[in-house]
Amino acid sequence: MLRPSDRPLIAITGANIILDKDERAPISGVRKAYLDLVINAGGIPVLISNTTDLEVLAAIVKKFDGLLLTGGGDIHPSRYKAYPKKESGKNGHTFDPNRDVAEMFLAQAFIKDGKAVLGICRGLQMINVASGGTLKQHVEGHFNPKENDYWYNKIHPVLFLNDTYLRRLAQNESSADIIRVNSQHHQAIDKVGSGLKIAGINPEDNVIEAMEGLQMPEKFLLGVQWHPELFPEDPITKAILNLFVKSATDQKKQ
């Protein structure tokens, strides 16, 4: 068990939430399950603001040991030199320009510095866009806002690809190349960004479900399209978070 002084600081991004339709007083928030994942793996989670102040963002990069990019709304297509299609920014996936600015800066800076970065759902997409990749603005069959099953049940399979660290991790934990995951997204990876490779796909439709950095595990860079925070006891979830926090701890000691 890590001593308190050895626990790494993990910056966690979140969304601006409007309560009671009062846009004058948005709340910065994140699902508690994200925080619990980091705590249970030995890290110290800190929710950060979606500020556009580059000096503040640079200070966050300097002071924190790891970055967790969480789920949320759509990344504006202008971030990957595209125009919004009719499905973008709709049905609870509202655009958030400030969040785009903050997460782009943080993702690029943490990756450049070789610090641990984990992306979940939108977070996977942000890692890709920050690395020069693009997104498919709408895919069918992966999102149903009216059914909790898509959040809390394992809807479809993910096949881990050969020669990836994620496959090795899955085989070590469950002796399996295929797992089943929940699904709550309507966008997906299109062109893969620089320094990344595909680590997992849905074999039913070839949608990319996981990507990792080319220097894994020495430099932890991983994104998954599903929501592992809703299955905290899953062995793959635990393995990913333990490695993420361990990598951030190693960075802290340097």
Image (cartoon, rainbow, N blue to C red):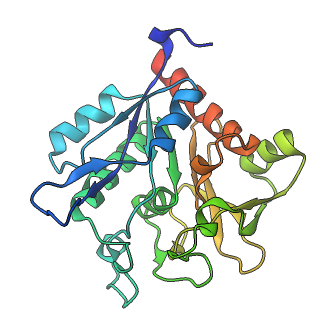
Please state which of residues 143 and 205 is positioned toward the viewer in this rendering: 143
Q: Quadrant of residue 245?
A: top right
- Can residue 198 be seen here? The reply is no
Q: Residue at x 18, y 37 (%)?
A: 56
Residue 114: percent from the left, percent from the top?
Answer: 48, 36
Vertical order, 1 against 230 (above or below): above
Q: Residue at x 65, y 63 (%)?
A: 182
Q: Quadrant of residue 92?
A: bottom left
- Can residue 66 be seen here? The reply is yes
Residue 123: percent from the left, percent from the top?
Answer: 46, 56
Residue 157: percent from the left, percent from the top?
Answer: 77, 67
Residue lying furthest left: 24
Count of marks overlaid on the render: 0
22 left or right, relative to 118: left
Q: Residue at x 73, y 44 (%)?
A: 234
Residue lying furthest right: 175
Q: Residue at x 42, y 64 (%)?
A: 129
Please state which of residues 68 and 150 is positioned toward the viewer in this rendering: 150
69 left or right, relative to 167: left
Please state which of residues 160 and 134 is positioned toward the viewer in this rendering: 160
Please state which of residues 231 and 78 is positioned toward the viewer in this rendering: 231
Vertical order, 19 against 155 (above or below): above
Residue lying furthest front: 20
208 left or right, relative to 124: right
Vertical order, 154 against 4 (above or below): below
Residue 145: percent from the left, percent from the top?
Answer: 50, 74
Q: Quadrant of the N terminus?
A: top right
